[in-house]
Amino acid sequence: MLTKLWKVDKNVDNLITYPQIRQAATLLMENHVVALPTETVYGLGGNAESDDAVAKIFAAKGRPSDNPLIIHIANQAQLANIVREIPEMANQLMEAFWPGPLTLIFNKQDGKLSEKATAGLSTVAVRMPDHPVALALIEASGLPIAAPSANLSGRPSPTTAGHVHDDLDGRIAGIVDGGPTGVGVESTVVDCTGDVPVILRPGGITKEQLEAVVGEVSTDPALADPEQAPKSPGMKYRHYSPNAPLYLVDGEVEDIQQLVDEKRAEGLKVGVMTTEENRERYQADVIYPCGRRTQLESVAEALYDTLRAFNESNVDIIYGEIFPETGVGVAVMNRLTKASGYPIIRK
Ligand code: TXA
Ligand code: MG
């Protein structure tokens, strides 16, 4: 399949009238799948009402079919059409954070969406992305758009159109290039079907931000306990992985350097994932800084690009620093521990 590539400037007025957006929206209306930028990561969009379109999303990514998709909308009327009721906590959260990196779980109305999009669940995940290109495309198509991250299943999520191209060229109808995304990690997924909101996946909106709006917020205990089945089906899979094994180290630069030296002495090509503050302090084959430690938002923004960069450098093993689990650091550590798949080495 030939994958079309459109470039758009997200800052222009009246994006919806641009030929790139019209063409991409037409493909969506014909049940083809198109990658589009959001403020978190690139999504692989398709008509959420169509089994055919949703099947194409799962096939292009190689995604397990029991992992439901987030439905992306551009206005409240689209929400009312697919959910059974809107709880008060959801109203408060939408008011504060939509459009933005927050996905809410609602009880769904039957018969409105492809059953494949929701993996047969009685609930549906919905979000309104804070990106002019995504909003213009959704509006131009007039459809609810199902969109998982636009990466091959298991690989780091894409934060540039180039990342999408690397994974999905030839497998999808098109890519709308709206420049690099901003937040860098995916939306926070919050279940609003119970008495209090429950975080099922940490992401761009922090627990502290949620609590400031709705008071008590809990977190799915399975996120901290590998023995429990998570409530969000996607959280059980290994994810975001670079090709080489990644080991996270809770220790000082000197501790990590010692591990690096040992592996280099064995003849391995060793990478270090560090931050701007520490990059000059290591000696290794490949050293990539991932943002600034003093500003966790910059770490989130650079995270997937840094993980992907190690694949190009052909290292045999990677050692990575860890981050404090406050604010968006919770999402960063959630993604890093999944990318690693190994217990953290404690020094
Ligand atoms: O920022 C984002 O959320 C990006 C952009 C493209 O919008 N999308 C994204 O989608 O990360 P995806 O498919 O990679 O992750 C969706 C997550 C999965 O963990 C999935 O299991 C969960 O949302 N999910 C979807 N529907 C659900 C439901 N009804 N109940 C619980 N979890 C659900
Ligand atoms: Mg994903």
Image (tube, rainbow, N blue to C red):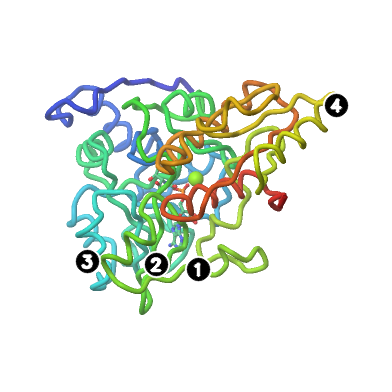
Q: Earlier in the sequence, mark 2 or mark 3?
A: 3
Asked if marks 4 and 2 touch (Cβ < 8 Å), the reply is no
Residue drawn where x is 32% and y is 31% of the image: 27
User: Front-most of 201 and 70?
Assistant: 201
Mark 1 residue type: Asp
Q: Secondary structure at mark 4?
A: helix
Residue 292 place in picture, x, y as percent: 46, 36
At label 1, counting other C-alpha atoms closer than 10 Å, the crowd grade (few under 14, some 14-19, many 20 or more) is some
- Dot 2 or dot 1, earlier in sequence: 2
> Quadrant of the rendered structure where residue 327 is?
bottom left
State if disc 4 and disc 1 touch (CB < 8 Å).
Answer: no
User: How much space separates mark 4 and mark 2, taking CA atoms?
Assistant: 49 Å
Q: Is residue 217 left or right of residue 293?
A: left
Looking at the rendered structure, which numbered label has been put on residue 265? Answer: 4
Q: Nearer the viewer, residue 99 or 284?
A: 284
- Which of discs 4 and 2 lies nearer the camera? The answer is 4
Give the structural element (helix, strand or loop) at label 3.
helix
Q: Position of residue 103 (x, y in %)?
A: 35, 56
Residue receiving disc 1: 220
Q: Amino acid at mark 2?
A: Asp
Q: Tell me if the residue at label 1 has its CB under 8 Å from ligand 1.
A: no
Quick check: marks 2 and 1 in contact, CB under 8 Å? Answer: yes
Amino acid identity at mark 3? Asn
For this view, does 268 lie left or right of residue 43?
Answer: right
Residue holding disc 2 = 191
343, 110: nearer the viewer: 343
Q: CA distance from mark 2 to mark 1?
A: 9 Å
Q: Earlier in the sequence, mark 3 or mark 1?
A: 3
Identify residue for label 3: 91
What's under tag 4, amino acid-wise?
Ala
Q: CA distance from mark 4 to mark 3?
A: 58 Å
Residue 320, quarter of picture: top right
